[in-house]
Amino acid sequence: MTNHWGRIARVRPLYSLIVPVYQNEHSIPEVLERIESLNGSLPDPIEAIFVVDGSPDSSYLVLRRLLPGANFSSRLVSHSRNFGSFAAIKTGLSLATGQYIAIMSADLQEPAELVVGLFQELKKGGSDIVLGVRSKRDDSFVSRSLSSFFWWTYRNFVQRQTPKGGVDIFGVTKAVGTTLVAMSESHSSLVGQLMWVGFRRSEVAYVRQARKHGKSGWSFAKKLRYFSDSLYSFTNLPISIILVVGATGTAMSGVFALIVFSTWILGGIAVPGYTAQMIVQLLSTASVLLALGVLGTYIWRTYENSKQRPQSIVMSDESF
């Protein structure tokens, strides 16, 4: 169907594809080729929502130049600064109009067939959330080992429902997407929220491919901060650690106090009060500082959420 300008009339898509973009200018042409191929292979229309998350390279300019010539409807959104990939995904979720929504990375490490698998699984109607689970990854030994350790720790201490290989890519229904967007807590974990909301879940296995262009912005510091956000948002482990440390310290203090008292009775302490003072200082100071640090973190997070600042700021929004 065409309008009087001779252009193809916009049809509401069944599928929405969200692509967070950060330092991906060299891979964008191939990303568009893959999406064009997807649009041709799926039986229903697809829309692609590109969210440029404060990328310092020319990713926005490349997309602005190439998207008008693509064979699929698209939307180009730019954040005012770098808010993180999960904030970019939530921006995409808030703008998606399709009944089924999938995430696609712009670094080309997930095969295009995975997106098709996510959409097909959602369309069957038996799942509201479909997780892309890595069965194998074509990365270096160090990268594989660190990633495995990270997700093992995450799975055992944060969310036990998380798949063993972790979750980078997923698909959801529009209802689940709306639910995730409504969760406005700051300094949280999108994967944790995805596990927390419930709904019917299934998995699609895939082999993670080697990165072709550039270097990943998912640094160790960001992973550590992400794990910390997940830990404080979805478990009471830090408080439990304080209780264990406090109970252990109390028991040890009692034992040492008994030893000090016995030594004093036998005349083995030359300087009155020195040993007892050192024991108390060594055991109590560290425990108090640890407790204050954990409690302070909870207080800070409560304060941050009380500000009710947006998780991201959209600087520009264009449709093609």
Image (cartoon, rainbow, N blue to C red):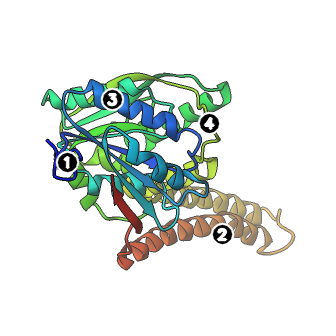
Instruction: Name the residue that disc number 1 marks.
Output: 10
Q: Is mark 3 on a helix, strand or loop?
A: helix
Instruction: Name the residue that disc number 2 marks.
Output: 285
Instruction: Name the residue that disc number 4 marks.
Output: 213
Picture coordinates of residue 119, whole percent (x, y): 25, 31
Q: Nearer the viewer, residue 70 or 92?
A: 70
Which amino acid type corresponds to the residue marked 1 in the rendered image? Arg
Taking the image as drawn, is residue 160 in sight? no
Chain-order first, disc 4 or disc 3: 3
Q: Nearer the viewer, mark 4 or mark 1?
A: 1
Instruction: Name the residue that disc number 3 marks.
Output: 38
Q: Residues within 10 Å of mark 4 (few under 14, many from 20)?
A: some
Chain-order first, disc 3 or disc 1: 1
Q: Nearer the viewer, residue 95 or 147?
A: 95
Which amino acid type corresponds to the residue marked 3 in the rendered image? Leu
Residue beneath the point at 24% across and 50% down? 177
Indicate the quadrant containing the N terminus: top left, top right, bottom left or bottom right.
top left
